[in-house]
Image: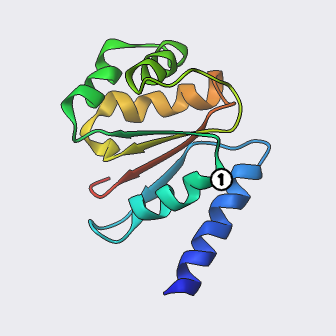
Amino acid sequence: MRNIQRRALDYLREWKNKVNRKPLILRGARQVGKTTLVKEFSKEYDVFLHLNLENEDERLLFEKFHSAKELIRAVFLFKNIQQVKDNVLLFIDEIQNSQKAVAMLRYFYEEENWLHVITAGSLL
């Protein structure tokens, strides 16, 4: 089991260092360790923003803000963390609960590519 976790973390590190990095989507059945893996990986970042879209307040952020820049600012404010633009990981868990969140992935990549974005979902 440790070997699998090490390989998964190695893959995430390769993704982190890519010049043309796109948001990463982790798909899999419930309770297989997607969130645990990302939380372990988040230790390599200065700032970790975790949104779980099973939480209505967190899901509503995607309904209220229509640009990636506004949404990122709102997430930092919602989490009560000072906004920075270096070594930040945004993890969107249970993304299948918001079609607007899925659509926003494109804009994170095109407009705010300094932000590292990982999503996870069991019903994608």
**Place of residue 20 in the rendered image (x, y in percent of width and height, measured from the top left):** 75, 42
**Place of residue 119 in the rendered image (x, y in percent of width and height, measured from the top left):** 45, 47
Judge whether 19 appears above or below 34 on screen. above
Judge whether 16 appears above or below 115 on screen. below
In this picture the colour scheme is rainbow
- On screen, residue 79 versus residue 58, left or right, reads right
Q: Give the quarter of the image for residue 43.
A: bottom right
Query: Looking at this view, is 31 or 25 the one in front?
Result: 31
The extreme right residue here reads 19
**Looking at the image, how many numbered discs can be counted on the residues?**
1
**SS at mark 1?**
helix
| Identity of the residue drawn at 39% across and 13% down | 65
**Residue that numbered label 1 is attached to:** 44
Residue kind at label 1, given as amino acid type: Glu
| Identity of the residue drawn at 54% across and 31% down | 106
- On screen, residue 10 versus residue 61, left or right, reads right
| Identity of the residue drawn at 61% across and 77% down | 6
**Place of residue 45 in the rendered image (x, y in percent of width and height, measured from the top left):** 64, 46
Query: Looking at this view, is 73 or 107 the one in front?
Result: 73
| Identity of the residue drawn at 55% across and 25% down | 107
**Place of residue 50 in the rendered image (x, y in percent of width and height, measured from the top left):** 42, 41
Query: Looking at this view, is 90 or 123 the one in front?
Result: 90
**Mark 1 crowd level (few <14, some 14–19, many ≥20, 10 Å Cα):** some
